[in-house]
Image: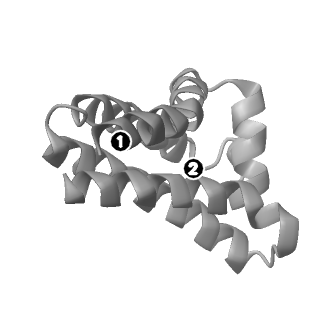
Amino acid sequence: MFTLSVVLTVLLLCEVLPSAVVALFRARVGLARLDELTRLGVLQGRYLWVVSLLGVLHLFATVAVIVGLWVPALGVAGAAVEVGVFGWVLSRQLRAGDRGRSLGAYLLFLAMALAVLVVNLLR
């Protein structure tokens, strides 16, 4: 079970770490992608606090999921935060009318976060 937890955690971190860095530094590429997915208008300067909040949440979740390899309760907390973030992005996409392939990436990220959550719950 520990090996599965490590593998899933590494896979989740492959998405979460770049997202945290991009959000915390407000990199143009990250702002454009977030704006494309959520239609918040961050490129026009609206709701920039959401970008900072997402960066902090991703950073917290990253630390919690890594520590969760030794303390499963923290892994559960970190994965739950990511489930919330990825679920929120998906809900924004669905509200905007996205369908099919455009939902694929965040469905995969949500599935990875759920897998980490479940494995840590079982541990």
31 vs 13, nearest the viewer: 13
Number of numbered labels in the structure image: 2
43 vs 9, nearest the viewer: 9
Which mark is first along the chain, 1 or 2?
1
Q: How much space separates mark 2 and mark 1, taking CA atoms?
A: 35 Å
| Amino acid at the residue labelled 1 | Ser
89 vs 44, nearest the viewer: 89
* 2 and 1 marks in contact (CB < 8 Å): no
Q: Residue at position x 35%, y 50% from top? A: 79
85 vs 45, nearest the viewer: 85
**Helix, strand or loop status at disc 1:** helix
Q: Residue at position x 81%, y 73% from top? A: 98
The percent coordinates of residue 27 (x first, y second) are 68, 23
> Badge 2 is on which residue?
47
**Residue 61: image tag:** none
Residues packed near mark 1 inside 10 Å, few (<14), some (14 to 19) or many (20 plus): many
**Helix, strand or loop status at disc 2:** loop
Question: Quarter-wise, where is residue 110 in the image?
Answer: bottom right
> Badge 1 is on which residue?
5
| Amino acid at the residue labelled 2 | Tyr
Question: Quarter-wise, where is residue 63 in the image?
Answer: top left
- The nearer-to-camera label among 2 and 1 is 1
The percent coordinates of residue 94 (x first, y second) are 70, 77
Is 88 displayed left or right of 41 in the figure? left
The percent coordinates of residue 1 (x first, y second) are 29, 46
**Chosen colour scheme:** one colour
- Answer above or below: position of 118 versus 28: below
Q: Residue at position x 58%, y 52% from top? A: 109
- Answer above or below: position of 13 versus 4: above
Q: Residue at position x 45%, y 53% from top? A: 113
